[in-house]
Image (cartoon, rainbow, N blue to C red):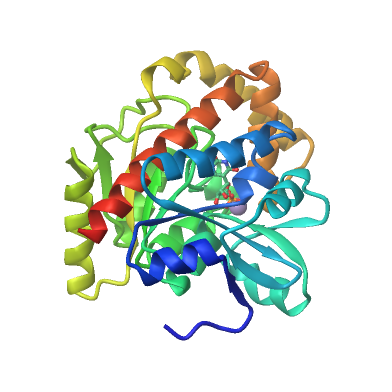
Amino acid sequence: MNLPDTFIIHDEVQTALNERRPVLALESTIISHGMPYPDNLDFARLAEHECREYGATPATIAILDGRVHIGLNEGALEKLARGDGIEKVATRDLGLIIARCKSGATTVSATMRLAYLAGIQVFATGGIGGVHRGAEQTGDISLDLKELGETPVIVISAGAKAILDLPRTLEYLETAGVPVLGYQTDEFPAFYSRKSGLSVAWRVDSPEEIAAIFREQLTLSLTVGLLVTNPVPLQFEIPATELNPIIEKALYECEQLGIRGKAVTPYLLGKIVELTAGRSLATNIQLALNNIRLGAAVALALTR
Ligand code: PSU
Ligand code: MN
């Protein structure tokens, strides 16, 4: 594929792509805007380590000084974790950030698009953005959903964050034509919790099935993503009953402070870490690592 000259593909990633070995894309907003320093740096390193352990080359994606990096070195991870001058970059911000030679951490939407352009088919994150509660009034719907409806990449997530309006998020995904698969579950997981009370469209039980479904989508030239939802491991989940009052409190304070737009999700995640005395951070890290393990297995299945 002919890549724009603003792209810098890490040697290790380029070699893996050339040799048709499994590559897994990882996002950077979860590092810069989703977790506090220095836990986020430990997470970023562990994420890449876990990916390798499970047989795939990690390609963490971010923009540094106007260059799109597909695969990062240790210095870049450190810079993203510290977060100074690091913008939160969704697909709509890509042109501006690159044109102005700025640095940014990519969200699910931007990471999907850049992974696709770089020829990477699988991407593991924590949880996708979605329709926010109260979107009837605010109209706040994450660009992640639109991107899922437009870009053929497999996204492995722990569902959507419980801070969102999950029924409306699922309705949006249906309208956008995005298949929502439950990995070894019939229920749509709610990020910190394994259950949401909502059903997924289809259940799958192996990485091979996921790879087979994606191949058929490509054969049909369907230009949509494939959303895989993978529940947080039982020992790390925070049950919804326990979390709901905390989410209510975080949402209330967010509203009181008048926080809007792209600052909402980072604020809520940070507030929940504070209100759970760090427990939600441990859960966030574990669910993301769990997604990386599955993502590596799916990337491997796609090479067979
Ligand atoms: N998953 C996490 N932590 C995060 C995010 C996802 O475990 O911080 C980020 C992703 O980058 C996602 C973004 O795309 O939150 C959604 O932001 P918004 O609601 O502003 O679209
Ligand atoms: Mn938003």
Work out which quarter of the rendered image holds the C terminus and state it: bottom left
Horizontal placement of 285 versus 148: left or right? Answer: right
Give me the residue at 75% from left, 35% from top.
Answer: 37
Q: Is residue 183 left or right of residue 257?
A: left
Could you tell me which residue is drawn at 64 percent across and 40 percent down? 34
Viewer-proximal residue, 90 or 84? 84
User: Is any part of residue 194 visible from this angle?
Assistant: yes
Q: Looking at the image, which residue is at 83% across and 51% down?
A: 84
Q: Nearer the viewer, residue 113 or 263?
A: 113
Q: Position of residue 135 (x, y in %)?
A: 54, 48
Q: Quadrant of the N terminus?
A: bottom left
Q: Position of residue 78 (x, y in %)?
A: 73, 46
Q: Which percent across, then down, holds residue 119?
A: 41, 71
290 vs 179: above or below: above
Identify the residue at horizontal 42%, vertical 24% (top origin): 193
Farthest residue toward the right?
A: 84
Q: Is residue 240 left or right of residue 99?
A: left
